[in-house]
Amino acid sequence: MVDIASLPLSSSAPLTVLSEEEHMFQAAAREFAENEIRPHVETMDREGVFNPELLRKFFQQGFMGLAVPEAFGGSGGTFFMANLAIEEFSRVDASAGVVVDVQNTLVNNALERWGNEAQKLQYLPRLVRETVGAYALSEAGSGSDAFSLATRARQDGDCFVLNGRKLWITNAKEAGLFIVFANVNPEFGYKGITAFLIERDTAGFSVGKKEDKLGIRASSTCELILEDCRLPRAAVLGDVGKGYKVAIETLNEGRIGIGAQMLGLARGALQHAVAYAKERKQFGRPIAEFQAIQFQLARLATEVEAARLMVYNAARLKDAGLPFLKEAAMVKYFCSQVAERVASECLEIYGGYGFTKDYPAEKYLRDSKIGKIYEGTSFMQLQTIAKSILG
Ligand SMILES: Cc1cc2nc3c(=O)[nH]c(=O)nc-3n(C[C@H](O)[C@H](O)[C@H](O)COP(=O)(O)OP(=O)(O)OC[C@H]3O[C@@H](n4cnc5c(N)ncnc54)[C@H](O)[C@@H]3O)c2cc1C
């Protein structure tokens, strides 16, 4: 292992070379995924429920506050390290990956970036220690066109009264704190959008139906209902009318996390398929001895490596304070394609067995589909990339 810090200044470390701290953290996340997450994967997928004891361990081990400064009780790590955890968890279970992803790259991130001191002091230590967070932008009528959201926040003296519904909200079943986007001045269009911090037990706020999904079944996805939900001005995250900035800029970073989730998933699917190809015999020899299978695995491994380089580069750009908008959209677009292709072709390597629930291949494929949909569909990523190259 090379310690980046020991390299001469003139030489840039290869992207996949980790610092000693990153390396140790990756090993710890990998061990946790194997020992703590893997035993629950099948049951959680079948029942569509995230194991509460496992969630408690996420907090205990510091995985829910990875990049939160130590002053707020967090682990004081980097955005890159949060992505290493998302990758390692998703290699074993993409639902576990997205729980950690939403908490770290969306909720904690938005609070750190846009919260005032009082909000950070009130919420960050809780998010690190015990409170799951959720990020609620989408609605039934506004997905890709997120800023046409219909949830309204009417100003009433020094309070805001929220009415509307949110759909598809990850972590909502378990969450204690919600970042909810509503429009304060619809006549100003997206410049009326405002982000609010809402505690689960607030009057007028409730969590509705949980979706029964194709993949990432253990990760909860629910509706939120706001009926005359009265919030003090102190619940506004960032400035009134600047919620669109909170939403866009947080999601730009979140997309790298989804890339890491898809990278981990692809690695997991491939590892299982490689092991199976060495075991399964046809025509008197392991199928891994057929050149067709070897070339298929080699192509998939190459795609996984390309995905890894893109995720690591984008995460390191973000940590270095450099622009990463185009790269993040490319990461999300490319890694979700790689994950689906790798999961699908790995399933075929199992032959008929891959099509059953006796092997993990079908779950990887089901879980991979979401990568092209949430935090902006593939077409939305292409739109961002096209804008940045065409000007
Ligand atoms: C499991 C899951 C978890 C989610 N978690 C969250 C969450 O935590 N918080 C949250 O706020 N949201 C969440 N979402 C919502 C998610 O971000 C949206 O589903 C996504 O943005 C797509 O919106 P939509 O479903 O309304 O599809 P639509 O926007 O209706 O899109 C339908 C199709 O039309 C295409 N399309 C739309 N507009 C254009 C265009 N201009 N050009 C070309 N094609 C276009 C899309 O690419 C897509 O193929 C989640 C969704 C799911 C399924």
Image: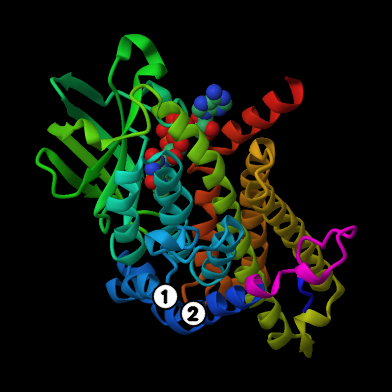
Residue 229 as seen in the image, left or right of residue 78: left
State which mark lies toward you, 2 or 1: 1
Occupied quadrant, residue 263 = bottom right
> Ligand 1 appears in which quadrant?
top left
Asked which secondary structure carries label 1, the reply is loop
Rendered residue at 39%/78% (across/down): 40
Answer whether residue 8 is magenta in the image: yes
**Mark count:** 2
Instruction: Report the residue marked by disc 2.
Output: 32
Magenta region, residue range:
4-22
Residue 319 coordinates in the image, percent (x, y): 63, 51
Q: Amino acid type of disc 2?
A: Phe
Residue 382 as seen in the image, left or right of residue 261: right
Check the image and report above or below for 153 versus 281.
above
Front residue of this view, candidates 81 and 172: 81
| Image quadrant where one finds the C terminus | top right
Residue 131 coordinates in the image, percent (x, y): 28, 60
Magenta span main SS = loop
C-alpha separation, residue under disc 2 versus residue under disc 1: 9 Å
Residue 71 as seen in the image, left or right of residue 199: right
Contact (CB < 8 A) between labels 2 and 1?
yes
Q: Amino acid type of disc 1?
A: Gln
Check the image and report above or below for 317 versus 49.
above
Residue 35 coordinates in the image, percent (x, y): 47, 84
Front residue of this view, candidates 287 and 64: 64
Instruction: Report the residue marked by disc 1.
Output: 61
